[in-house]
Image: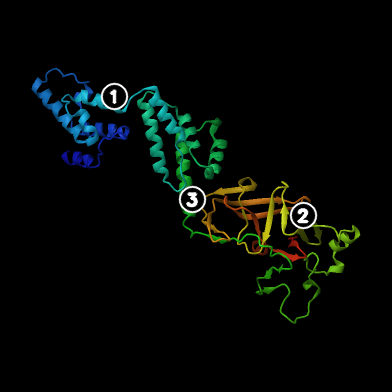
């Protein structure tokens, strides 16, 4: 018994002006473990059959035990007390005042409590529960659902996916505190698991006007060379490349897109800010003037960059699917690092209703530009050609 008591005392903290809500229950535990609880349990009233001398000695033992765990900054307030119950209630009145001002202060701290990415969920829940306990001691009891909603609202924007998921899946629209806590622990574990992978750094360079007169061909992975084949080898028809649309299997004068543009008199038109799409056999072709892809919003542009390792955007609302998390950093063109806070897919729609799905786009809030990586499009089977200030991307469809 003595060993157990000394062990519990060894982890005890001293009372200060800021930790009463934690100190109080732990001090009670020590008094009960040492059989010194009677003066508090009986509210200072001497039980029948106990002598005055024995009661006085017991009170002094309790007072001595309590004052042993009172910080020097607090000690002078209780240094003259010899009655255990009076000392106990005095400390309560000092640090557990149930005034409207104190209640408002605790509620304000609870509402303003915010979780920070990277912090332990256990620590955050401890802070949250400490404030709930303070309110409970002030006779202000929040029901379970309200506690769950307050805790959920303490999560940052990077946890929006979890917040929306829990809100939509709550049975009969009612969340419980246990559900929110369990979900937070699961999300923390998932993010830590993803964080095991080495920090990814994407070399993203801002648009430098390098798109003119550059061609990028998808390589034949099985042979380790481009579709053009080895130098000096005569081309079969399937190796022919159209220098107008970038398609394979025909030349410019046979190009349906070229003929259609001629028929419409578009060969001399200004295509600086327009896009077009056409289907040529088993290929879908997307054209875009000056490397810009215009979204449905006319004020939003994507820049086609051959130097970008990833598709990147700063706009959270562009994503059709999204996963929050710490996915490493992006190295900008000025060598500064910016956080990747999420990733997902984005479906682009040009002003000609052509759809282009970008996979595994990085969400970087600090990014000033939205970038499309031609390297990733190459890997996905697109052929990217830059001719006369126009981006031309074609993809062979699987039949």
Q: Position of residue 191 (x, y in %)?
A: 48, 50
The quadrant in which residue 123 appears is top left
Q: Which mark is residue 273?
A: 2
Q: Nearer the viewer, mark 3 or mark 1?
A: 1
Label 3, residues with CA under 10 Å away: few <14, some 14-19, many ≥20: some
Q: Kindly give the residue lying farthest to the bottom in the view shown.
A: 232
In three-dimensional space, the C-alpha distance between marks 1 and 2, rounded to whole angstroms, equals 73 Å
Vertical placement of 16 versus 365: above or below? above
Residue of label 1: 93
Q: Is residue 116 left or right of residue 247?
A: left
Residue farthest along the top direction in this orientation: 48
Q: Residue at x 55, y 30 (%)?
A: 172
Query: What separation in Å lies between label 3 and label 2 (alpha carbons)?
Result: 41 Å
* Residues marked 3 and 1 touching at CB (< 8 Å): no
Residue 393 location in percent, x, y?
74, 61
Secondary element under disc 3, as helix, strand or loop, is helix
Q: Is residue 176 visible?
A: no
Q: Which residue, as the protein is rendered here, is positioned at the far right? A: 263
Q: Give the residue displayed 46% in from the left and 33% down from the top.
A: 111
Q: In the image, residue 92 lies at what x, y percent?
A: 28, 26
- Residue at which label 3 appears: 191
Q: Residue at the spot x=48%, y=33% of the render?
A: 150
Q: Position of residue 370 (x, y in %)?
A: 64, 54
| In the image: residue 177, left or right of residue 343 | left
**The label number, if any, that marks residue 367 in the structure image:** none
Q: Tag 2 or tag 1, which sits nearer the N-term?
A: 1
Q: CA distance from mark 3 to mark 1?
A: 44 Å
């Amino acid at each position: 018994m003595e060993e157990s008591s000394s062990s519990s005392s060894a982890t005890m903290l001293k009372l200060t002006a800021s930790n009463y809500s934690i100190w109080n229950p732990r001090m009670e535990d020590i008094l009960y473990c040492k059989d010194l609880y009677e003066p508090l349990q009986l509210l200072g009233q001497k039980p029948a059959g106990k002598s005055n001398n024995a009661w006085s000695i017991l009170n002094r033992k309790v007072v001595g035990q309590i004052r042993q765990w009172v910080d020097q900054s607090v000690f002078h307030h209780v240094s003259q007390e010899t009655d255990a119950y009076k000392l106990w209630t005095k400390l309560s009145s000092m640090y557990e005042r149930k005034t409207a001002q104190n209640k408002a202060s605790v509620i304000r701290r609870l509402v303003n409590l915010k979780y920070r990415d990277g912090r332990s969920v256990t620590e955050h829940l401890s802070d949250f529960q400490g404030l709930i306990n303070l309110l409970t001691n002030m006779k202000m009891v929040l029901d379970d659902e309200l506690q769950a909603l307050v805790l959920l609202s303490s999560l940052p924007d990077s946890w929006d996916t979890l917040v929306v998921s829990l809100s939509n899946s709550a049975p009969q629209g009612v969340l419980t505190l246990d559900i929110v806590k369990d979900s937070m622990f699961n999300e923390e574990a998932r993010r830590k698991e993803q964080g095991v992978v080495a920090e990814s750094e994407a070399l993203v360079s801002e648009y430098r006007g390098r798109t003119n007169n550059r061609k990028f061909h998808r390589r034949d992975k099985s042979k380790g060379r481009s579709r053009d084949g080895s130098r000096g080898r005569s081309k079969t028809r399937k190796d022919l490349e159209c220098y107008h649309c970038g398609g394979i299997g025909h030349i410019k004068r046979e190009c349906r897109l070229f003929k259609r543009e001629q028929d419409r008199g578009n060969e001399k038109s200004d295509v600086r800010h327009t896009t077009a799409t056409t289907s040529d056999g088993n290929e879908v072709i997307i054209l875009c003037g000056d490397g810009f892809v215009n979204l449905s919003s006319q004020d939003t542009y994507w820049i086609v960059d051959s130097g970008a390792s990833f598709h990147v955007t700063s706009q959270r609302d562009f994503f059709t699917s999204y996963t929050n998390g710490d996915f490493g950093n992006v190295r900008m063109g000025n060598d500064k690092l910016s956080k990747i806070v999420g990733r997902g897919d984005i479906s682009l729609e040009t002003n000609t209703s052509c759809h282009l799905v970008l996979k595994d786009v990085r969400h970087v809030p600090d990014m000033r530009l939205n970038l499309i990586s031609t390297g990733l499009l190459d890997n996905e089977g697109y052929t990217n050609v830059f001719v006369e200030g126009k981006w031309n991307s074609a993809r062979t469809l699987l039949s």
